[in-house]
Amino acid sequence: TDEAWRAQHELFERAFIALMECPVPVIAAMNGYAYGGGLETALGCDFIYAVRGARFALSEVRLGIMPGGGGTQNLSRAVGERRAKELIMTASAFTAEQAHAWGLVNRLCEPGKALADALDTARTIAANAPLAVRQAKKSIHCGLQMDLATGYRFEIEAYNRLVATEDRIEGVRAFNEKRKPVFRGC
């Protein structure tokens, strides 16, 4: 029924929003085909690593619906309005190589290496100050929704919240002592 359809979709909507609002970085590791909601899930992530030969599409218009998991918004922001309109309205599939050229995919990986490469990046990020990583993610995401001057003011507020943290003190101390910092997230 229409009611059951809407109730089911609301669960997906909540999942997509939770993914996009996750305060820590999320990396998608794409190993094959991601059509419809699969691509929308990847688009909700901060980075996309994909194996060469992976294929993507937002093909919902072929089913009498349209992307409803952030696809129209996130694809447009990643590849530009005109390309997003073409891809969504034609329901055309595209390759990982095309997605990389358009700026949708961050890294092309060899077959079977997307997850390992994503985990390597995750470890690199996890070695950094967690509060700083969260503030940077929030500043980038929110700042892109604002004009440049307002975005910069938002960035400065986020920066200033880090000044009094123990991690900032530890980071500077470690830099001066030429050692690796030990961050605690406070």
Image (cartoon, rainbow, N blue to C red):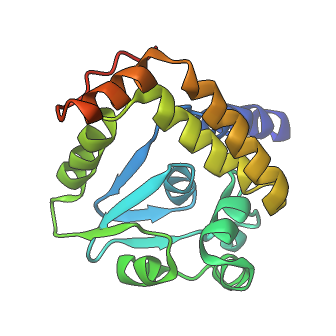
User: How many numbered discs, if any?
Assistant: 0
Apparent side of residue 147 relative to residue 124 in the rendered image (left or right): right
- The front one of 179 and 75 is 179
Q: Is residue 62 above or below residue 171?
A: below
In x, y percent, where is residue 95? 40, 80
Q: Residue at x 73, y 61 (%)?
A: 73
Q: Quadrant of the N terminus?
A: top right
What residue is at 78 percent from the left and 46 percent from the top? 153
Q: Nearer the viewer, residue 162 or 104?
A: 162
Q: Tell me the quarter of the picture where residue 92 sits.
A: bottom right
Q: Where residue 85 appears, x then y in whole percent? A: 73, 80
Question: Relative to residue 46, is residue 67 drawn left or right?
Answer: right
Q: Is residue 167 above or below residue 91?
A: above
The quadrant in which residue 32 appears is bottom left
The answer to whether residue 74 is visible is yes
Percent position of residue 140, x then y: 62, 50
Residue at image point 76% right, 33% down: 4
Q: Which is nearer the eye, 142 or 67?
A: 142
Q: On the image, which quarter does residue 60 sit in?
A: bottom right
108 sits to left or right of 19: left
Query: Looking at the image, which is closer to me, 170 or 112?
Result: 170
> Measuring 84% from the left and 60% from the top, which residue is drawn there?
147
